[in-house]
Image (cartoon, grey):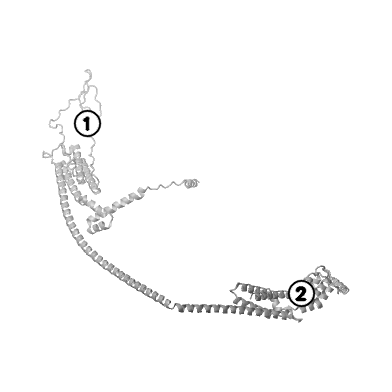
Amino acid sequence: MLKLRLNRIHLNRPIPPVNRKGIIRRLVLPTTFFAGLFYGAGVYGSSQNDKFRDFFMDQVPLGETVLNICEESNLEQLADLSKGTIEVVDQSIQKIKSIAGVTDTSSTTTHEKPIVEKIKAKTEAAVQRGKELSQQKLPEVIPKKIQPPPISVVQEAPISVKPASSNLPTYDREIPIGHEPPPGYIGSAPRPRDPSTGPIPPPPTLPLLAPTVKELASSEPILAQLASSIDSLAGFLRDHPNVIVRGKDPSGLDPPKVLSTASEDLKNLADRLQNLKEEKKLELQSKLDLQAKEYEENWKNEFDSERVKLSEKFQQKLNKELEVQESLINERLEQEVIKQGIEIQRNWINKIKSEIELERDGRYSKLSKLESCFKQLGRLTLDNQDSLDHQLRINSLWNSIRSINSNVFDTQSFTKIPLDNHIRALKRISANSHKINSTIDEDDQSVDLLSTAIDTIPENVVESGIESLPNLTLWYKQSVYPRIQSASLIPKQGGLISYLTSYLLSNLFFTNLHASSSPFETKDPIHILNQVDKFLDIKDLNSAIRTLNLLDGWPKVLAHDWIVEARKHLEFQQAIQVIETEATLQSLLS
């Protein structure tokens, strides 16, 4: 349970936001570090290999500038200076050891050995620090003088004890260590000192080297560091005078002038470095002068060669331009000559044409008159031809109408009359009229009216034909009239008994009555039948159909077939009348 609670606590704990690194840590510091490492390795490789130096100067950005800065700072001599500095410091250490009486054999006392080891360690540390500073090219840093801890000197003070009273016993023996003096103790007088062991004279003042090389500190930082190291050693010796044993060596002579010798060596080294710099400067200047002369000669030769090449190229280009311009000028001249020739030829042709026209003006006028006469004659011929064609079409249309009237309406036959030949002839006449007179509006209207009248005739009528008027009259009198008369008394909802009753009673009617003048006054079946019979006798089929439509009930059902055939006959007759009227109109207009 405890583990589960701890896991829930850890899961519910909010995740702390991740701190993003700044742009300096992410970009500036790594870029600066890798750039310094890359250029440092390039400078070192350039000092070791000439081919790599040329590559570094030509291909690497700012490579030549970095190498020039390193050459101006004389960084190539740092290795030699560091080696010389190490040798001088080693010599100084050996001299200090010889003065202090320290040898490789363990002949020194146990009291002086720790001090010499301290001096050696501090000297080596100072030398190592000087090497690091010289390699890192740091500015002048003067190490602080080592201040040894003050040595506490306890002077033995004479013990003064007040004299005890006269009545107390005296004690003249030495007091044991760790015991207090008894009452009445009188100590012995102090021992007199040896006059030969007087106070130790102060050590001689050691000179400082840093001020002497101050002028070279800016140009030679290694010398300044070396001088500061020697000054620190001198300060250490000054603070520990026991190292040189009161300033006397075993022979009783003065100590060797180590520091002065080191100072002189340092000055000589500085002079040598200065002379070496001057020599290298002169040598480099001479090399630069020679190289500049060589470069100048090469540049002059290249300049002359390039000038010759440019002059040749310019001459070639100029020759080409001259050739192009010459060809363009010649082409323009040719075009101008051709243009002038064409213009002259045109002028001559115009003059010749004008003279010919003047000479043939009379002939042209006669020919134009003849042409106008021929055109007028052609127009008259065409007009006559159109009139003749129109008359022929009208005549053919009238012939078709007369044929239909004689074969359909004026016939005395009692059979069904076919209409397909007559309708086919009318359609052919209408199509020819439409093709010939398609440009005339009036003819177009007449042709449209003729075709419309023909289209009103149903196809079943054309195929099956129509009944003639005598046949319709005979059909009515023999079949329709008796049937309607026998069924005239049947009601609308009547059955067989009603029919038998109507059939028997219809024979008792008076049928030969005089018909009234108005056919639409009554709906009596017998009266309507008499009226229809009268209209058929005078050949008024339209009035007969209208009168027969007044019937209702069973009489109208019995008359339905006759009415349909009569309507077909009447519709065809009306269409033929329209065509006849149109033919009459065209005859009048022509």
Q: Quadrant of residue 389?
A: bottom right
Q: Classify mark 1: residues with Cα within 10 Å, few (<14), some (14-19) or many (20+).
A: few
Is residue 98 visible from the viewing direction of this image?
Answer: no
Residue 71 lies, with reference to residue 459, above or below; the image says above
Left or right: where 413 falls relative to 13: right
Task: Specify which label sits upstream in the sequence, 2 or 1.
Answer: 1
Left or right: 221 in relation to 365: left
Which residue is most to the top? 167
Q: Secondary structure at mark 1?
A: loop
Q: Secondary structure at mark 2?
A: helix
Nearest to viewer (mark 2 / mark 1): 2
Which residue bears the numbered disc 1?
154
Residue 480's place in the image compared with 255, above or below, is: below
* Side of 524 relative to 258 (left or right): right
Q: Residue at x 61, y 79 (%)?
A: 388
Above or below residue 267? Residue 503 is below
Residue 155, position as x, y percentages in the image: 20, 30
Q: Residue 14 in the image: x percent, y percent?
A: 46, 46
The front one of 153 and 89 is 89
- Which residue appears farthest toward the bottom when viewing the image? 413
Label 2 belongs to which residue? Answer: 541
